[in-house]
Amino acid sequence: MRSRAVHFVGSFPATSTDAAMKAMADSAGPLLGTVPTGEARRFEYYVRPILEELVDRGVLEVAKAGQWRTLRDLPKYRVPQGKPLSGDLMELGYSREAAEAVPVFSALREACGLSGAVLQIGMPTDLSLAVIALRMRGLWSARKPFAAATVREIAAIRQVAGDDVVIQLEATAELVSMAMTQPLHRAVERRLGHGRGIAALAAAAPEGTRFGVHLCLGSLHNKGLPLRTTRPLVDLANSIARQWPSGRVLEYVHAPFAAGDRPPSIRDRFYAPLADLALPAGTKFHAGFVHDTPTEEQQRRTLRSIENALGRRVDGVACACGLGRRPRAVADTLMARAVALAGA
């Protein structure tokens, strides 16, 4: 039986794009459908370098300093007085990342048997950026400018990489808010329009753009917000799928079953809502359960629980989030485990 794919979420603990992409390609080779850049500029703190660059450009300013140790210790930003927030003033850096990665990917493609793979560029949703930067104020006041800047970056990436790239939209604020409010998460999703917002971001991108969606529970210093059940992520994925725009390809949805240092549940009932997952035909489902705490045999049992609930094999195996917040030795171990579990 053919192995499942291996999916790497994006970040990797390496100081260069070349080193990160080579490590991932060497590890999983032809099992990869997409190859991330490793996010060398931002692998450890995710959006921190993006927001700090916006401060340097005068688009934002620091209202209260923070150390990025926990979610409660993040800096607070604000829009400078007299300077309306505009997407035209924002440069988020994704297109620079893509321009650096394209020649690296081209060189690796043949060397590592990646003929069927494409480049993967990860970027947080406009809501995730707005909420991390401006807290609840960003929900209403900053989302449109961040969306405009994100769409401009996507268009620039398409010019650099053409159709050989998948844009991975990373829905952190969306899934975390639903995890925090379960079992009332459906009302939160309806009120805030999480699925609608992600679909609208895709609709604003150039026609033909290929997308993946990474549902994210966070991983700052390897800490994430655990789910009580998979129901919130199933409901969010289904909402995105129902509202997905025509002319844009939803290549995959990645779902986290672990949360930072918390391994995936061993309870079958935790995964039962996966029976209701309804993705478009051709959209792959990547299961984010690979973790370093359980044994490999325990992880095989978890994979069986996921697939039994889903009613079919998953299309790919993955960790719950990127590897950038882990030491390199742990990242290497997790990549090897993902490859082993892909063929389980």
Image (spheres, helix red, strand yellow):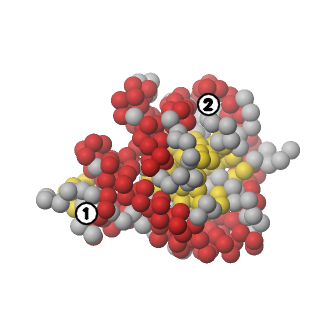
Quadrant where the image shows the N terminus: top right
Q: In this view, does 235 lie above or below 337?
A: above
The 10 Å Cα crowd at callout 1, few under 14, some 14 to 19, many 20 or more, is many
For mark 1, what is the residue?
Answer: 59
Nearer to me, 240 or 22: 240
Q: Is residue 123 above or below residue 314?
A: below
Nearer to me, 4 or 155: 155
Q: Where is residue 255 in the image (x, y as percent from the top left)?
A: 57, 41
Label 1: element kind: loop
Kindly indicate the quadrant of the structure image that contains residue 162: bottom right
Q: Give the residue type at disc 1.
A: Val
Q: Give the residue type at disc 2.
A: Ala
Lower position in the chain sequence, tag 2 or tag 1: 1
Q: Can residue 72 be seen in this view?
A: no
Q: Can residue 118 be seen in this view?
A: yes
Q: Which mark is residue 278?
A: 2
Quadrant where the image shows the C terminus: top right
Q: In this view, does 87 lie to the left or right of 110?
A: left
Q: Where is residue 142 in the image (x, y as percent from the top left)?
A: 28, 49
Distance from Cα at disc 2 to Cα at disc 1: 40 Å
